[in-house]
Image (cartoon, helix red, strand yellow):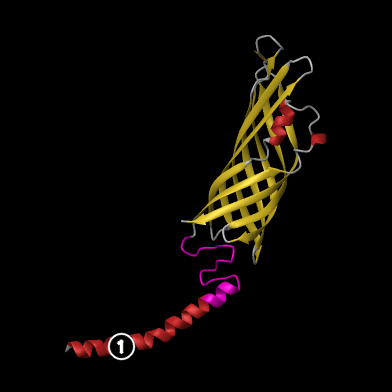
Amino acid sequence: MTIRTLITLAAVVLGLATPALAQDAVGDIELGANGTSSSGSSSYNSSRSSDLRLGLQIRLDALNMLGPLDTTPGSTQSIGRRLLVPLAAPGVRILDGRLFLGAGLGFYGWSTEAPNGDEASRSGFGISPLAQFDVVREGAAALSLGGALHLASVSETEFCPDGGDCMDGDDGATGVGLSLSAGLRGILLPGLALGGDFGWGFLSVSSDNDSSAFIHGLFAAILLEATVGI
């Protein structure tokens, strides 16, 4: 078989394959425009190269930050309620982008100064492993259900009298709890979504002074999520 014959056969094969490849490409474009693909993924995924996406969720506490809910600012109850909404949650999206698994991180601090110069401060932080699953997806919008486990720590209250040495109150506390929520979000740009969560959660708190508290209540949060395929 001569080189000329090989070139001729290659040209024939390419000529036959090109229409089929073009048809597949057009089909993929049309399916993508309808929000689906041959693998069943929706337009929620901005990349088809991988089913795994790194993500970061930012939540703004839209309910518990209201002043009327803080009957005693700086108390264990007040700090605990705020820690039910983690500020940032790095994680991953899997299962065609339907499931988000993350580790929520929250922090809340409080301080005050009296007219006589006395100062007081207290803070707390929480770690919240969480999961959210899209039960309904329509186009670029999704309805999800989720839950989180909360592990929280609240520092002792620090009192600093004017002109005197600071003292710690014997009220440090640790807590464990759970929250359940439902959320809506819609895609703004590829890899960027905006939504909100609404739910109920609790913290069971034990203090260093042998006291305990059961903190619970509704919460609402504004959610911003950014993801990138890997």
The relative height of residue 170 versus residue 202 in the rendered view (above or below) is above
36 inside magenta stretch: yes
- At which x and y percent is residue 139? 65, 67
Is residue 119 in view from this perspective? yes
Q: In the picture, which quadrant includes the N terminus?
A: bottom left
Depth order, front residue of 229/146 = 229
Residue at the spot x=56%, y=72% of the render?
A: 32
| Numbered disc 1: secondary structure | helix
Q: What segment is highlighted magenta in the picture?
A: 29-50
Residue at the spot x=63%, y=41% of the render?
A: 87
Crowd band around label 1 with a 10 angstrom C-alpha radius: few (<14), some (14–19), many (20+)? few
Amino acid type at circle 1 is Ala
Q: Farthest residue in the left direction?
A: 2
- At which x and y percent is residue 85? 67, 40
Residue at the spot x=46%, y=63% of the render?
A: 49
> What is the quadrant of residue 64 in the picture?
top right
Residue at the spot x=56%, y=77% of the render?
A: 30
| Residue position marked by numbered label 1 in the rendering | 11
